[in-house]
Every structure is written in structure tokens, then in C-alpha cells.
Amino acid sequence: TPRAKPTGEVLADLARTCAAVYAANAPPEADFKRRQSLVNHLEKVCRSEWRSSFVWMFGSSASGMCLKNGDVDVCLTVPEDDPKAILVSGAAASKAAMVNARGIVQRLAVILKRAKMQDIHLLLRARVPIAKFYDPISKFNVDICVNRKLAQINSDLLRTYSEVDHRVKVLSILVKYWCKRRDINEAYRGTLNSYAYILLVLHFLQTREPKVIPNIQRTLDGVEVPDEEIPKVMVDGWNTYFDRSYKFPKDWVKSEESTELLTLEFFRYFAYEFDYENDVVSVRKGTRQRKADGNWFPTRNMDATGSESPAPAPRHPEKHLFSIEDPLDLCHDLGRNIDEDTLVVIREEFIRAFEIIVRTGDFDLACEPYFDPLIYSYPMDFAAP
């Protein structure tokens, strides 16, 4: 039930099982070295086609909040002065950049196959075109995109949050493990990607009483400042400023809640307390934001100052049933592809996890792999053993 309280024994069991899951799934130092070696190799491969290009990690691989042996997110940057870069200016630049990204991703497929990469799949109709493949040497699955300037800054933002409080990284890895095991972590299949789940963790920790973490997009030298005093660091039309050297002020009321209690309360929050119909997950604001309060428009774009402007019509219907605002690209709702059926599935998973945890304290049981009866059903001619 929504108001159920865990016993001391349940919390002790939860502390033990959370610690075990984290220890088994947090990447060791050797894991990061393998990732960097893979990136170095990919850069050599890509420079056979784009001589001045470079390849870099972003996402959880760069922020340190990845799972052991988890997928590697990398970005290929092809500078404008590269002989094979397509230069477009004026009003058509944004659309042409997308076309160019798709063209580069298509060319990448050929280059990756030549480099002996396996299971190459292209997602050309995605909001960000990517190539997915498997590297048999490092044994990592890889997603590679093209020319995403904001991706690196996003990764730096998440890494800074993880350095502000160690509970950010621990809870993020636990939640990522849970959503992967429960098969609700693929945006292209209609659920949420792992980046969205990390934003859910940050939002939850920002809105606890007392807060676990501050909003470092609204602080300067550790002190929260009004909107007009937030510095401007503009990239692709968005203000990417955040307090990179944040230190807690002396008057900060520090949360002493344990990781296991925060884990339980995270699932309670999204199972029973978050208002999916009216609320927006906004790490940028650091508070519960209402869709109807005039500061967030699911059908409009906002520029870096928060001023609204008509948004282009999306290629596919966007329902915004679970609204998760990107903290830098303000017109990007990471939950835009969630439909009514998928929202029911995700909410049921939050409820299931909370009810198991509050009753048993067994986090590993809450992460039991999802079993799809439509895929793993027995043929009619055979009886189950």
C-alpha cells in the first residue's frame, strides 16, 4: 500500500541486498580502461574516412554511472573543416545537419563492417540517428551518434551530481540495474532510456525533504541565485551553465537518509506520489513543476532564456504522458514516446518493485528478470514440465 512502512529487519535486509547488487554491477577500474581502449580504436577506424574526426564517450560511460559490461555510448565529431563534412548555413542548417548525420551514420555502417564489428543496426528515423553494434574484441555493445555537442556537457552535468553526493551514483546504478532486468529501458521500443531513469533519480533526490542534492544549474559558488543572475554559457542556442565546482554552503541542511531508505522511497514516489498527468520531471528547475503553470509547454519550444516560440510539428504524435525535461535541451521531453499502454506498464513496475521491497527488503527479488509469456509460452502440443 502507498503508506506502508518498512520494519527495521526489512531495512537491514534491503541494505544488504542493495549493497550486494551494487557491488556486483558497479564497473571496476578495468572496465573503464576497456571502454577507453575501444574508443581509441574507433577513432582510428573513423579517421580512415574523416581525417580530422574524433570519437569520445558520453552518457553513463563518461559520468561513471554505467553498469559493469554495460553499453558504451560514443559520439563521432566530424569538424566543419573536414574535407568530407557537408556545410550548410542559413535557415536550412538545422534540417540539413540531421540529414548529414543520417548520411554519416549510413557510411559508418560500411566502415564498421570493414573493421569487423558485428550485429550492426541503424536507427535512422530516431530523433538522434545512431548505429548500434557489437565489438568482439572488447565485448561491448556500442551506440554511436554524430556531432552532438550537448551530449558531452550533459555527461559532465551528471558526473558533477554524482560527485556532490555518493548516493547519486549508488541509487542510479541500482535503478538502472532494475529497469534493465525488468525490460523497460529501451526508448526505441516505447519505454525510457537509461538517461531518463538517471534524471528520475536526480529529480527525486532534489525534491526530498530535506533535499539530498541541490540544483547546480541554479547555484553560483554554492549559493542559489535568481534566474537573471544565472551565468550564460550558450551552446547550440541553450544555456549549458552549471556550477562545476559546487560546494555545500554552511547553512545546507544535509540529508542523513541511508541509500537503502532512499531506494525504497524512490519506488514509492514514482509508484504512488508523482502526478503523471500534471507534473514534469525537471532537473533544471529542481522542484516539482506543473505542466499548466506557464513555464513548461509540451507543444512549444523554449529558447535558452525560457521564452516560448512555436515548435515545429513532430514527425510522430507526442503525447507527453510522462514528461521528463532534458536539463539542457528544453524542448526535448524524454518521455514523449510513452503511450497509454506503456505508461501503465512502467507504473505497474514501480508499484511491483515498491511492494516487494517494503514487504521483504529483497532488492534482488524486485529485479527478477521480466518473463514475457507471449515470447516464452509453451507450444500447444507440449505440456509444461
Image (cartoon, helix red, strand yellow):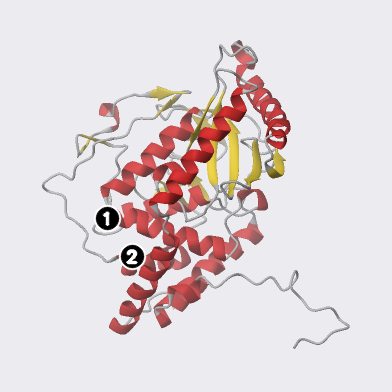
Where is residue 240? Give x, y as percent.
39, 30
**Residue drawn 20% across the image and 39% down it:** 222
Where is residue 65? Give x, y as percent.
41, 50
**Residue drawn 31% across the image and 65% down it:** 259
Q: Which comes before the other along the chain, label 2 or label 1?
A: 1
> Looking at numbered disc 1 in the image, what kind of residue is underneath it?
Val
Q: Check the image and report above or below for 338 versus 120.
A: below
**Residue behind mark 1:** 212
Q: Check the image and report above or below for 371 versus 231.
A: below
- CB atoms of marks 2 and 1 within 8 Å: yes
Residues at marks 2 and 1, CA–CA distance in whole angstroms = 10 Å
Q: Check the image and report above or below for 255 versus 75.
A: below
**Residue drawn 39% across the image and 50% down it:** 29
> Looking at numbered disc 2 in the image, what kind of residue is underneath it?
Leu
The secondary element bearing badge 2 is classed as helix
**Residue behind mark 2:** 262
